Image: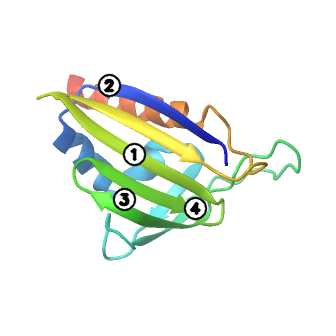
Amino acid sequence: MPAYSAARDLPASREDVWAYLAEPNHLDDWWPGLHGVEPDRRGLAPGARWRIQGRERPAYVLGRRPDFAGTLIFLAVRPPEFAAWQFVEARLDVELQLTERAADRTRVELTVSAPLLSGLRRSLPHKALTRLQALCQTAAEG
């Protein structure tokens, strides 16, 4: 199963980054290809299932990208340092690790894996973390 990783240093405390990530409505702000999130009552917790909407786009047979619409289930959650989840229909597994670097600095590592020929692109974790970093940077400047 191919797996791709990316890492970034964010200009925010680990607790602030975790608080942002734990808010379900923020997922589509930083995860590429999402258009909406409908969490269950448990929020960010092991076993929680969120309904997600992907962006409408044509489905190409060869070189297609995974469609994230459907269900996201959290497999493991250890606040404020780790979360693992799966985009069920896309068969995409995600692990997110937060490491405190300083009081106002957090290292975020994102690993995404999927079955061969699933459409997973090497750039996905980089794009997601670039968007997350931009959101944290805007918040730090504001």
Amino acid bearing label 4: Gln
CA–CA distance between discs 2 and 4? 28 Å
The image's mark for residue 9 is: 2
Q: Name the residue under label 4.
A: 53
SS for callout 1:
strand
CA–CA distance between discs 2 and 3? 22 Å
**Which residue occupies 53% across, 63% down?**
52
Mark found first going from the N terminus, 2 or 4: 2
- Counting from the top left corner in percent of width and height, residue 14 is at 20, 39
For the residues bearing labels 1 and 3, Cβ distance under 8 angstroms: no
Q: Mark 3 points at which residue?
A: 24
SS for callout 3:
helix
Amino acid bearing label 1: Leu
**Nearest to the observer: residue 89 or residue 31:** 89
CA–CA distance between discs 4 and 1? 21 Å
Q: How crowded is mark 3: few (under 14 residues within 10 Å), some or many (20 or more)?
A: some
Number of the front mark, 2 or 4: 2
For the residues bearing labels 3 and 4, Cβ distance under 8 angstroms: no
Mark found first going from the N terminus, 2 or 1: 2
CA–CA distance between discs 1 and 3? 15 Å
Mark found first going from the N terminus, 3 or 4: 3
Mark found first going from the N terminus, 1 or 3: 3
**Which residue occupies 29% across, 55% down?**
22
Mark found first going from the N terminus, 2 or 3: 2
- Counting from the top left corner in percent of width and height, residue 118 is at 74, 51
**Which residue occupies 55% across, 45% down?**
112
Residue farthest right in this picture: 61
Q: Name the residue under label 1.
A: 96
SS for callout 2:
strand
Number of the front mark, 1 or 3: 1
Residue farthest left in this picture: 103
Amino acid bearing label 3: Pro
